[in-house]
Image (tube, rainbow, N blue to C red):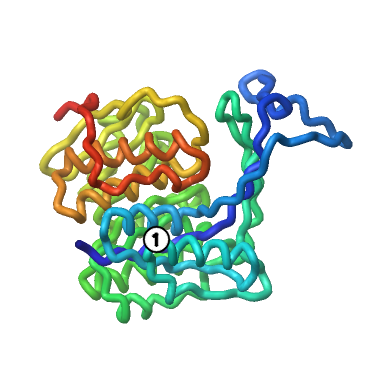
Amino acid sequence: MARIVSLGSGLQDIYLIDHDDLVPTEIGETAIFGKVLVGSKVDIDRISYEVGGGGVNSAITFARHGHEAIFLGNLSRDPAGAAIIRALDSEGIDDSYVNFLERRGTGTSVVLLDSKSGERTILTCRGASEQFGNFDEKDLDLINPDWLYATTLRGDMDTIERFFKKAKTIGAKVMFNPGVRELESTKELIKLLKYVDILNVNKAEAMKIVSGVVLTELLYKLNNYVETVIITDGAMGGIAGNGQEAYRFGIYEDQKVKDATGAGDAFGSGFLAALAKGKTFKNSLIFASANSTAVVAKLGANKGILTGEEMLHPMPIQKI
């Protein structure tokens, strides 16, 4: 098994779930929750309190797979932070490197979820997970991880670079799933890719880093920067290559989506969890897809995360 640090956010997710008042209404090419009027009072069917954030979700995947998972993120000593710590402890995740920022409050998301369609809108106050400059890369010396799994740090390229450089100094490998803020700084992002062993992006994100619209072209160009690249494309599956082999893959199964929150985290962390356990490149992609499918079938960003012990059925995947 491997020691894996999950670097990223921790949030409490508060779900407001309803079957008729949050029905999406299309307006041109977009949609709104059309029955919620300004000044109205809406009766919600139920509320569910969950935990999430890219750092927390990925750490849960690694822990359930049997790896030694360490979460490195910012919380506060408030009820939301306490809920996240309880969740981490219940999964056996090392939370001793959590930073507590008292004045900002733990990040919280309110998820408006239409229970009929699975569509949702997320309102987020990131609180302590808004900034990451307080992170100390010297923590990696103490942890001595095999892998550093980094999700978005809200565009804090200096902190990302500090951690990536330190990871390389101590011999740890890096998997990176950049977010919107990192992708806004394309030139800086490309400079960071020399430290990255595995890059995980979706098609739209890949198109922001390199030119092109065809998956094979995007993969080829990104492979010039990173040896192993995974590009997902929603219901179309995706493409991945590691310098020796490349695969075009579909979705694991046509699952009714109950809640799409955390699907991307489940795919990326699922791939690394399987690969670090000794699975082949191909089988790691299959597990990643299965993990993502299992997550969207349940409420919350991590309740459906698999353990790696499940019997998986075949899925569309072809070597190219």
Residue drawn at 44 percent across, 66 percent down:
89
Residue 266 vertical position relative to residue 319 in the rendered view, above or below: below
Most foreground residue, 68 or 169: 68
* 149 left or right, relative to 315: right
Check disc 1 and give the amino acid type: Glu
Residue drawn at 70 percent across, 35 percent down:
45
Q: Which residue was labeled with disc 1?
A: 91
- The answer to whether one can see residue 206 in this image is no
Residue 227 vertical position relative to residue 73 in the rendered view, above or below: above
- The answer to whether one can see residue 132 in this image is yes
Residue drawn at 18 percent across, 40 percent down:
283
* 14 left or right, relative to 189: right
Image location (x, y in percent) of residue 79: 64, 65
Image location (x, y in percent) of residue 19: 66, 27
Residue 199 vertical position relative to residue 173 in the rendered view, above or below: above
* 241 left or right, relative to 151: left
The C terminus sits in image quarter = top left
Q: Residue furthest left?
A: 244
Q: Mark 1: give few (<14), some (14-19) or many (20+) Cα within 10 Å.
A: some
Task: Count the labels in the image.
Answer: 1
Image location (x, y in percent) of residue 281: 17, 43
